[in-house]
Image (spheres, coloured by chain):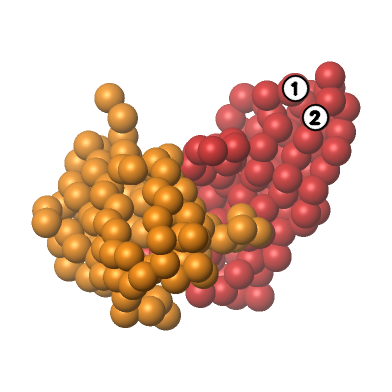
Chain colours: A red, B orange
Amino acid sequence: GQQLNQSPQSMFIQEGEDVSMNCTSSSIFNTWLWYKQDPGEGPVLLIALYKAGELTSNGRLTAQFGTTRKDSFLNISASIPSDVGIYFCAGQKVPGYALNFGKGTSLLVTP
Amino acid sequence: DTAVSQTPKYLVTQMGNDKSIKCEQNLGHDTMYWYKQDSKKFLKIMFSYNNKELIINETVPNRFSPKSPDKAHLNLHINSLELGDSAVYFCASTLYGGPQETQYFGPGTRLLVL
């Protein structure tokens, strides 16, 4: 499966700062998903995007599905220490099919 | 009330052994997956089953054999374990064709082959 290009690879920020990360692909995906993985746990879904151009929020998190269907970004506002973890983007081409994941963005938040 | 569960959480074994990992979901989903996460945290699909039928089989050594006894269970059997099999294995599930189809992941099985 195609690997997505996710950036940045890591971020080290102070509590209260805003965070932005993005994912790009050379091919079209019909669904974009953002997951967070805490140490020792499985990925947990944060936001799912199903339509090109869609902008969706979940608390302090906002994600958008690019109009070309080849990219997505995730913003976290006013970061807090519990935001620490690895954030993954994932694209799905066909319903029911496997997810193609980015390499992850490792986020560290200092109090 | 766990949604997707896996056993065991940790598995340490010797090279050459055969081992199994089990996955169960109580979400009423009909499609289940096995993903492998390597040491660099990259997640890659291995297998997918829909209604107990294999629908995805990526380039995985045939030492890995999935089995789905029913829609709620997907097990992974690994023969002749090798050092390179050390990784975290995640099970996931979804309802195929659902209005907003999303995959939910289990907590992972950390396999260490010595």
Circle 2: is it few (<14), some (14-19), or many (20+) Cα within 10 Å?
some
Which secondary structure, mark 1? loop
**Image position, residue A101 (x, y; %):** 57, 60
Horizontal relation, residue B37 to residue A3: left or right: left
For label 1, the residue is A80
Q: Do discs 1 and 2 belong to a common subunit? A: yes
Q: Secondary structure at mark 2?
A: strand
Q: Amino acid at mark 1?
A: Ile
Residue at x 64%, y 66% (from the top left corner): A4
Question: Pointer 1 and pointer 2: residues touching (CB < 8 Å)?
Answer: yes
Name the residue tied to disc 2: A109
Nearest to the eye among marks 1 and 2: give it: 2
Instruction: Tell me what residue is drawn at x 20 percent, y 50 percent.
Output: B73
Along the line of sight, the residue nearer the viewer: A92 or B24: B24
Residue A61 location, quadrant = top right
Q: Is residue A106 visible?
A: yes
Residue B56 lies in quadrant: bottom left
Question: Residue B79 or B67: which is nearer the viewer?
Answer: B79
For the question of whether residue B35 can be seen, the reply is no
Given the image, on which type of amino acid does mark 2 rest?
Val
Please, which chain is the residue tagged with disc 2 on?
A
Q: Position of residue B113 (x, y in %)?
A: 46, 60
Q: Classify 10 Å Cα crowding around label 1: few (below 14), some (14-19), many (20 and above).
A: some
In the image shown, does B11 or A93 lie closer to the viewer? B11
Residue at coordinates 80% horizontally, 53% vertically from top-left? A8
- Sequence order check, earlier mark of 1 and 2: 1
For this rendering, which residue is in front, A40 or B80?
A: B80
The image quarter in which residue A32 lies:
bottom right
**Vertical relation: B79 (above or below) A57:** below
Which numbered circle lies on residue A29? Answer: none
Q: Count up the numbered dots.
A: 2
Q: Tag 1, which chain?
A: A
